[in-house]
Image (tube, grey):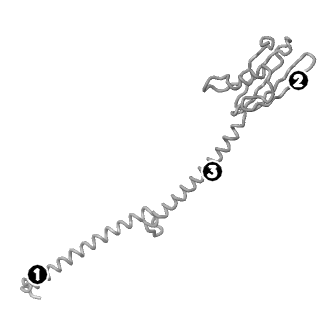
Amino acid sequence: MPLDELTTTVGAVALAAGAVALVALVLAVVVAVKARRLRAAQSTVLGGHERRDLVAHAERLENGFVELRDWVEDSLSGLDQRSIAQDARIAGCVAHRAVIRYDAYGEMSGQQSSSLALLDSHRSGVVISSISHRDQARIYVKQVHEGESEVQLSPEEHEAVTSALGSHPQGAPDTGVIRAHDARQSA
């Protein structure tokens, strides 16, 4: 093709088409290089030993997180149930206690008699009294339900229950009151 044919309309269109084709070829090479670099970066992130699709990898990660979240929620639910069961068991344990020592029958025997109150958080439990006398010793056990006894309590037993339930200030730990009491003083 002679040079003077390039100045015609057809020649100008051919030159323009060639230039557009050259620009398109350069752009295609640039895009291919960038795509190759992107694949190399993905391979670095995912590990280069096996081919993986980044979207599929992200989906597997999401599924793994969903499974992990479900497992954690199930575990927490189980822990909540165990915690409720433990709270119920703890509520039945001895939470309040007190010992009152005294001389029974008006004797001066070194306060060998005593009443022990053992109550749970529902204020239920037992009062155990050991009455020591010169010739004999007796033990009495009385049931307490929600702070009230099934049978009448002696003054010392009542004091043991009252001390166990209310002897410590609000917020202070229950240390178990141990007090000496002379039955003759309360008579």
Q: Label 2 is placed on what type of residue?
A: Arg
Between label 2 and label 3, give the one nearer the viewer: 2
State the residue position of label 3.
78
Between label 1 and label 2, give the one nearer the viewer: 2
State the residue position of label 1.
12
Q: Label 1 is placed on what type of residue?
A: Ala
Q: Quadrant of the C terminus?
A: top right
Q: Label 3 is placed on what type of residue?
A: Gly
SS at circle 2: strand
Q: Which mark is residue 28?
A: none
- Mark 3 closeness class: few <14, some 14–19, many ≥20 residues within 10 Å: few
Q: Is residue 76 left or right of residue 115?
A: left
Q: From the viewer's side, name the closer residue of 174 and 164.
A: 164
Residue displayed at 85% across by 12% down: 106
Residue 19: x %, y % from top left: 17, 77
Q: Is residue 132 left or right of residue 73?
A: right
